[in-house]
Amino acid sequence: MVVNCIAYRHNGDRIGEISLDAISDVLKEPETFVWVGLHEPDEPLLEKLQEEFGLHDLAIEDAHNAHQRTKIETYGDSLFLVVQTAQLINGELAFGETQIFLGQRYLVTVRHGASLSYAPARRTCEHTPELLAHGPSYGLYGVLDFIVDNLLPIVRDCREELGLLEQDIFAETFKRSTVHRLYDMQRDLMTLRLAVAPLQDITSQLVRLHPNLIPDDLRPYFRDVFDHVFRVNESISAMREMLTAAINVNLSLVTFGQNEVMKKLAGWAAMLAAPTLLTSWYGMNFQHMPELGETWAYPVMIVVMALVVSGIYVALKRAKWF
């Protein structure tokens, strides 16, 4: 459950890994801060972190329950953020959640569900100690930037899959699996948009507010995250519109195909109706019928039926029913 717990000095240098019990001892030293990473912790572990950092009861309750909406809340001189994460697993889009506690001398990330480890974000921050010297807020930037950057490949893969589905839509044969996949993609993109859209408000607040936690030198970095979130959100909205159009086009093409089949069936029925009508007359039980006693009557009737059927066929062919 404890992925890592690392202490840093005020200049951004890494002190090293520490135990949870040693957190309070490290924080007693001036100009130090701690970065803790957790994965699906249990209640005793969260209570231990609450004791070490003085976290708010409501924030701890949200972190334990998970399944929270994307949000940012202020508790005294600390921030509590909930961010939805997404990950492609075996071609399927899975969603997770990360809760983040930010204080002046600590950063705690709690991962639930589908989410990649934030170790790469930590290493990136450690490679720029001059920025990590600003404290845990730079670590918060690294985590948010890592989350948003991982959304870009998902959006790109969805766009490529949508291009392949468009080829199936305009194919001559109807595929039920294409409709199912279009619906699944629309559902996933709707869920993804619900996860991404609130991030714009969160990053906007981090750019403008909370001066006690976000130094002015780091605001341009959070503005960059805001731009990435905006781009992802715009891409998702565009793809949702394209998916809606694709579903409507697919429905129209299916309806058009059914109409074409019905036109052909109606044309064949009209062609068969003419000889059926003529022969039904001669099937009646009457003695006096036209040309009934003539030897040439039967061939003439066949020719007449052929001419009538041919005329109907030519008329329907010109009307593009065949």
Image (cartoon, helix red, strand yellow):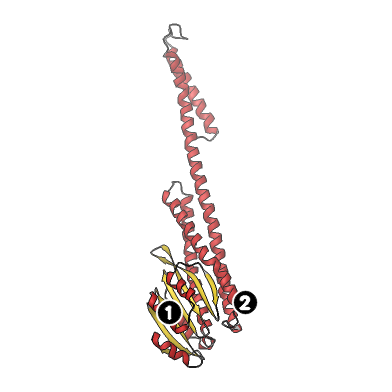
- The crowd level at tag 1 (other Cα within 10 Å; few <14, some 14-19, many 20+) is many
SS of the residue under disc 1: strand
The image position of residue 106, as x and y in percent, is 49, 84
The image position of residue 214, as x and y in percent, is 57, 81
What residue is shown at x 48% (from left), y 44% (from top)? 254
**First of labels 1, 2 by sequence position:** 1
**How many numbered discs, if any?**
2
**Image quadrant in which you'd find residue 44:** bottom left
Residue furthest front in the image: 57
Q: Which of 275 and 94 is in front in this view?
A: 94
What residue is shown at x 53% (from left), y 53% (from top)? 244
The answer to the question of whether label 1 and label 2 lie on touching residues, with beta carbons closer than 8 A, is: no
Could you tell me how far apart the alpha carbons at marks 1 and 2 are, in whole angstroms?
27 Å
- The crowd level at tag 2 (other Cα within 10 Å; few <14, some 14-19, many 20+) is few
Note whether 267 is above or below 220 in the view shown: above
- Residue 208's tag is 2
SS of the residue under disc 2: helix
Note whether 194 is above or below 103 in the view shown: above
Note whether 250 is above or below 215 in the view shown: above
- Residue 37's tag is 1
Q: What amino acid type should be assigned to the residue bearing mark 2?
A: Arg
Residue furthest bottom in the image: 29
